[in-house]
Image (spheres, grey):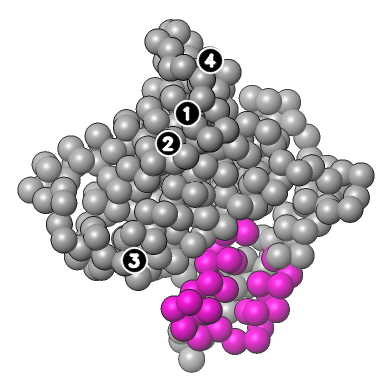
């Protein structure tokens, strides 16, 4: 899980660099194509059908939609917002997943975890800082991206169990391709032949994204979910490290306080969930 979070942070950084050399929609399209081709190859190697009837289930369609929407806003956030603030806001996704699972899927959530959800959302509010001099509208893009990814994860819980990880990866990256089409509403630059530098960043972005997903699936399948999930917060360290080393960013007081609220709330939710399971 720690490796997955590191590769996700590296993927974000490489994509942000790629934007400097290749048109935005082209970067997203190439990223989606690279990942889709990889997972299609993995599925075919295992003798799986790429188009089973289950991929048209309601849950999979909803998952596809929120993956696309989340990717669009996440990419826009990468363009306009600091990587450090995006990374911290994204840590609220597991908290939103819990709330959405309770409201949409009917999962039982006690008052203690609802309080933790509220504390986590307060942390997001502190980071964004609406009405303050430090408010940055670009942070709203990161929030919409986080919401899209969180609702995608909720839909993944309801997806048919017969759909393999390879097919989830394939259609996840296919949704990224659809997101590239949606991004043309903001950016319609003509595509270019990438330079050596741009191509290197693009290749690194795809490789990091694929490795991140492989490590994530390995962690979730071989480890106890309630044990490995808290290690998702290691992305906070990896992301902030990349933002400082690659982009020279620094953390504001609001970002530090907000991240403490989010991580504390998230860890309590995972801990409390484990306690409930053993009761």
Q: Which mark is residue 130?
A: none
Answer few, some or many: residues within 10 Å of disc 3's Cα (few below 14, many 20 plus, some between 14 and 19).
Answer: some
Task: Report which residue position mark 1 lands on.
Answer: 25
> Of the residues tagged 3 and 2, which is closer to the observer?
2
Which quarter of the picture shows residue 154?
bottom left
**Residue 100, image x, y percentages:** 53, 72
Q: CA distance from mark 3 to mark 4?
A: 37 Å
**Residue 119, image x, y percentages:** 73, 70
N-terminal-most mark, 2 or 1: 1
N-terminal-most mark, 3 or 1: 1
Q: CA distance from mark 4 to mark 1?
A: 12 Å
Q: CA distance from mark 3 to mark 2?
A: 22 Å
Residue at x 89%, y 53% (from the top left corner):
131
> Of the residues tagged 3 and 4, which is closer to the observer?
3
Magenta range is 91-120
> Of the residues tagged 4 and 1, which is closer to the observer?
1
Answer few, some or many: residues within 10 Å of disc 1's Cα (few below 14, many 20 plus, some between 14 and 19).
Answer: many
Task: Report which residue position mark 2 lands on.
Answer: 181
Q: Nearer the viewer, residue 98 or 266?
A: 98
**Residue 32, image x, y percentages:** 36, 35
Task: Report which residue position mark 3 lands on.
Answer: 59
- Name the secondary structure under disc 2: helix
> Circles 2 and 4: CB distance less than 8 Å?
no
Q: Which mark is residue 21?
A: 4
> Circles 2 and 1: CB distance less than 8 Å?
yes
The question of residue 142 being in magenta is answered with: no
N-terminal-most mark, 2 or 4: 4
- Name the secondary structure under disc 1: helix
């Amino acid at each position: 899980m720690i490796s997955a979070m590191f590769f996700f942070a590296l993927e974000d950084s490489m994509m942000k660099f790629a934007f400097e050399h290749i048109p935005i929609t082209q970067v997203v399209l190439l990223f989606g194509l690279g990942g889709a081709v990889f997972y299609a190859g993995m599925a075919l190697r295992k003798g799986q059908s790429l188009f089973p009837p289950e991929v048209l289930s309601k849950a999979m369609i909803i998952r596809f939609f929120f993956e696309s929407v989340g990717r669009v806003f996440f990419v826009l956030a990468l363009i306009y917002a600091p990587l450090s603030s995006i990374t911290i806001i994204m840590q609220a996704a597991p908290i939103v997943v819990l709330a959405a699972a309770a409201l949409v899927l009917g999962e039982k959530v006690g008052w203690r975890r609802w309080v933790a959800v509220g504390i986590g959302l307060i942390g997001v509010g502190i980071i964004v800082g609406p009405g303050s001099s430090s408010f940055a509208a670009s942070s709203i893009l990161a929030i919409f991206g986080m919401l899209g990814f969180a609702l995608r994860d909720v839909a993944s819980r309801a997806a048919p169990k017969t759909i393999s990880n390879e097919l989830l990866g394939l259609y996840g990256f296919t949704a990224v391709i659809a997101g590239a089409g949606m991004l043309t509403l903001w950016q319609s630059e003509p595509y270019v032949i990438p330079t050596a530098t741009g191509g290197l960043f693009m290749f690194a972005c795809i490789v990091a994204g694929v490795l991140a997903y492989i490590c994530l699936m390995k962690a979730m399948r071989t480890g106890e979910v309630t044990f490995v999930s808290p290690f998702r917060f290691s992305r906070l360290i990896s992301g902030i490290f990349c933002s400082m080393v690659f982009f020279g960013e620094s953390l504001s007081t609001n970002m530090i306080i907000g991240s403490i609220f989010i991580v504390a709330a998230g860890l309590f939710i995972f801990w409390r969930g484990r306690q409930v399971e053993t009761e």
